[in-house]
Image (cartoon, rainbow, N blue to C red):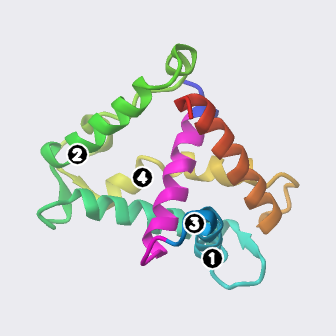
Amino acid sequence: MNTRLHTAVMAATFLVTTAASTANAEPAAESAATDRQQLAWSAVDADGNGEATRTEFQAAQVRAATQRFRRLDKDASGTLSPAEYAPALAEAKERRSRLPWIARRRMPEAPSFETIDADRDGGTTLKEWLASSEKRRAKMFERIDDDDSGSVSRQEFDEWQAKMKRFLGRRSGQ
């Protein structure tokens, strides 16, 4: 399994979810990317001091993952069923299929429902959902914190976003 590629996909999902969850309306095309970037940074730098600690960053990731879980939980039962997870899995497989063959070969498949249903009771709780990606969330912070300072600066965050945009654009043929 190539952890870097998997982390990149998770990172992109985090960025899109974070920006989308804080936006109320789509700004003009020229400033949309800048506005989304600012919204994503605002979500990560919770105290507004210009540095995002590991705690702030991971809290933003958990908020984004929680929002995704709630969107998938169509019946609002607090548990994802295989039927509720199936469209997200199909979407992930479809996105993966658009990648060049070398990236597909290196990128792991999206986790199956059975993988995230840790207690095997036929339903995935939010706790199981978050636990299934805990290690990847920690690795993402480490990759962004280029200077190993224990916090992410706005510059590190912006550089990471630009790198992810280039990576995902190349991989999807954009």
User: Which residue is labeled 3 in the image?
Assistant: 32
Label 3 CA crowd tier, 10 Å (few <14, some 14–19, many 20+): few
Task: Tell me the kind of residue under disc 4.
Answer: Ala
Magenta stretch, main secondary structure, is helix
For the residues bearing labels 2 and 1, Cβ distance under 8 angstroms: no
Residue 102 circle label: none
User: Which residue is labeled 1 in the image?
Assistant: 42
Nearer to us of marks 2 and 1 is 1
User: Which residue is labeled 4 in the image?
Assistant: 131
Residue 11 within the segment the image draws in magenta? yes
Q: Is residue 44 visible?
A: yes
For marks 3 and 2, the one nearer the N-term is 3
In the displayed structure, 109 sits above or below 167; it is above
Disc 1, SS: helix
Residue 85 circle label: 2
Horizontal and vertical percent for residue 48? 70, 84
The residues tagged by marks 3 and 1 sit, at their Cα atoms, a distance apart of 15 Å
Label 2 CA crowd tier, 10 Å (few <14, some 14–19, many 20+): some
Task: Tell me the kind of residue under disc 2.
Answer: Tyr
Horizontal and vertical percent for residue 20? 45, 66
Residue sitting at 20 percent across and 65 percent down?
78
- Location of the C terminus by quadrant is top right
For marks 1 and 4, the one nearer the N-term is 1
Task: Tell me the kind of residue under disc 3.
Answer: Ala
Q: Which residues are magenta?
A: 6-26
Residue sitting at 66 percent across and 66 percent down?
34
Disc 4, SS: helix
For marks 3 and 4, the one nearer the N-term is 3
